[in-house]
Image (cartoon, rainbow, N blue to C red):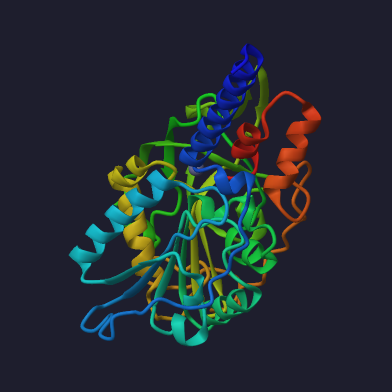
Amino acid sequence: MSRLKKFLLGTALALVLLVGVGLAMIHRSGAWFLLFPSRHHDTTPPELPADFGAGKSLRVLVFSKTNSFRHEDGIAGARRALDAIAERRGWALFHSENGALFSAPGLARFDVVVFSNASGDMLSDEQDRAFEAWLTAGGGWLGIHSAGDLSHAEWTWYRENLIGGNFIGHILGPQTQTARVIVEDRAHPVTQGLPAEFEHEEEWYSWDASPRTLGFHVLLTVDESSYDPAIRIFGSETSIRMGDHPVAWWRCVGSGRALYATMGHWARAYENVPYATLLENAVAWTGDRGACAPGASKDGAASGASATGTEPAPALGAPPPPMAGPAGEAAAAAAAEARGRASAAATAAATAED
Ligand SMILES: [Zn+2]
């Protein structure tokens, strides 16, 4: 073999190795589907045990399908925490990443659906409609962390009714910080057993508007003076300060109950006792078959202006620039390219996803 051939072969091998290592790192970071989002929709549901839920007080589907960013660690942490809670409370839990469960007969097997860091366009339009009908008719839903990111942008009903504001990014540089969480509504069933405030280490999310202004009921806020709400990357700095900064909120959706909690990036988030308590209470409360009462306090009295189960749908604005567009990840990647100072993966991770 000539020296030139050897050189070319060596260079080609080095390139293949470099690309391979790069792709492996992207995959390992959970960002694979952030860069190459999947639109795979399942058509065949998994088999549930025939006696699923028999003798149990609550039947819970923990759904963690990720067609966009995958929080491997957070999903595993939530699974451990929820399994332990279910064991203690006598709940039946079914973990799945199969969207074909989202049909009328499929969802009828559950009282609560938890979106545990579920991301992306996970469900077909038909499955979206089945979930909307099930929830509105009295189902319960708990969304955790990236269940609220912009990867769900194409599902307008979901964003408007369950999430509220548009996700504009999470802190970066550092990616997680310990901050003070304030329990704002101490009378609500979901905050029972929580201290008035607690410390929590998190990849804090920010929104273009406080869900409070959109008619959601705020349970917890994070004190922005206790951490630095900024995205720092490659020498640039963007403030994602909100002022009023809720981190857990709920609303009635027809007869159903919906609660979204922004925390849960790392597995250790679920080991923080106050947050685990909040999630336990949230599953119990969303699974309560009593009519959802806006403004309901511990004794169930409705203090809200609207009648039980008839909360007006929030008027949600269009996703703000640079996130405008059908898919946040693509828009953020384009913005990153325009700024020419960050890789698509790094910026998209901070401003569109996870
Ligand atoms: Zn995250």
| Residue located at (46% from left, 39% from top) | 28
Q: How many badges with numbers are in the image? A: 0
Q: Nearer the viewer, residue 239 or 118?
A: 118
Left-right relation of 289 to 84: right
Evaluate whether residue 219 shows in this view: no
Q: Nearer the viewer, residue 50 or 321?
A: 50
- How far across and how far down the image is residue 138, in percent? 48, 81
Left-right relation of 145 to 315: left
| Residue located at (56% from left, 23% from top) | 14
- The correct choice, above or below, for 336 with respect to 49 in the image is above
State which quarter of the image contains the N terminus: top right
Q: Which residue is outermost to the top?
A: 3
State which quarter of the image contains the C terminus: top right
Left-right relation of 133 to 237: left
Q: Nearer the viewer, residue 149 or 217?
A: 149
- How far across and how far down the image is residue 144, in percent? 46, 55
Evaluate whether residue 159 shows in this view: yes
- The correct choice, above or below, for 196 with respect to 102 in the image is above
- The correct choice, above or below, for 258 with respect to 52 in the image is above
